[in-house]
Image (cartoon, rainbow, N blue to C red):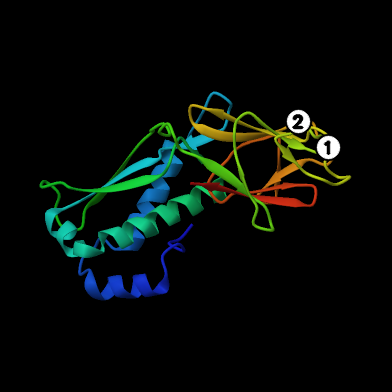
Amino acid sequence: MGFSGVSNKIVAASSRIFRTAVSPMTVARKINRLLQKEQTNDTHGHPIVPNHLIVAFSPKDRQRYGGAEETLRRQLVEVAHNYARAKGFGFTGPLSIDFATNPSFRNGRCDISGEFRDAPIGDEAVLVTSDGLRISITTPQLLGRNDDCGVVLAGSNVSRHHAEIRADQHGLFIVDLGSTNGTMVNGIAIDNHRLLHADIVTIGDHELRVEVI
């Protein structure tokens, strides 16, 4: 996947401002390669990747990014999220990116390293319905047609106990409970799936967006 998460404006600005071999596109490609290389499976068999990334520059290259580091950080987080979503990778907690300076690096060198970090206690997530209703996720949480479900969804194509959102040390995941019509995440039918921020869960005619708050 290319550097699609970075706007044309940022890319154009970087070509004028950052007179260095380490362009934002170069950093983005290195991050995607690291996620692919470091991918592993959690205890449920879900593919997961490091959620804390460290980007190390030479002193001169770090200086050239100057006050634009926060913009670059936000854009790289977006790129990493998009790449993970496209590959079906999950993160073990909120995604963060830090920048570092390595005095031994020559100009033009940039190294990426990654760490697995658990989600801090207190993180919350909600399901947002198509009409904007926000439903707090409390695990384990049943989704289905029955009144005993934490999220009650009407419709003949929704099973009584359709799916369940569960949590482990790596975050949230959703499990289809043998429903008649299946559960989809981002348009793909799943049995169980690690949930990411902005995922779209489809059950019957209902679309629920996952948001971390």
Mark 2 vs mark 1, CA separation in Å: 9 Å
At 43% across and 62% down in the image, what residue appears?
A: 3
In the picture, the disc for residue 177 is: 2
Q: Secondary structure at mark 1?
A: loop
Disc 2 vs disc 1: which is toward the camera?
Answer: 1
Mark 2 crowdedness (10 Å alpha carbons): few <14, some 14-19, many ≥20: some
Residue 110's tag is none
The x, y position of residue 77, in whole percent, is: 40, 53
Q: Looking at the picture, how far across and down is residue 60, in whole percent?
A: 13, 59
Element at badge 2?
loop
Vertical placement of 7 versus 42: above or below? below
Q: Is 101 on the left-hand or right-hand side of 39? A: left
Q: Which residue is mark 1?
A: 159
Comparing 133 with 65, the one in front is 133
- Residue 14 x %, y %: 29, 70
Q: Residue furthest top?
A: 43
Is label 2 in contact with label 1 (beta carbons under 8 Å)?
yes
Estimate the x, y position of residue 105 in percent, counting from the top left. 15, 49
**Residue shown at 33% from the left, 47% from the top:** 97
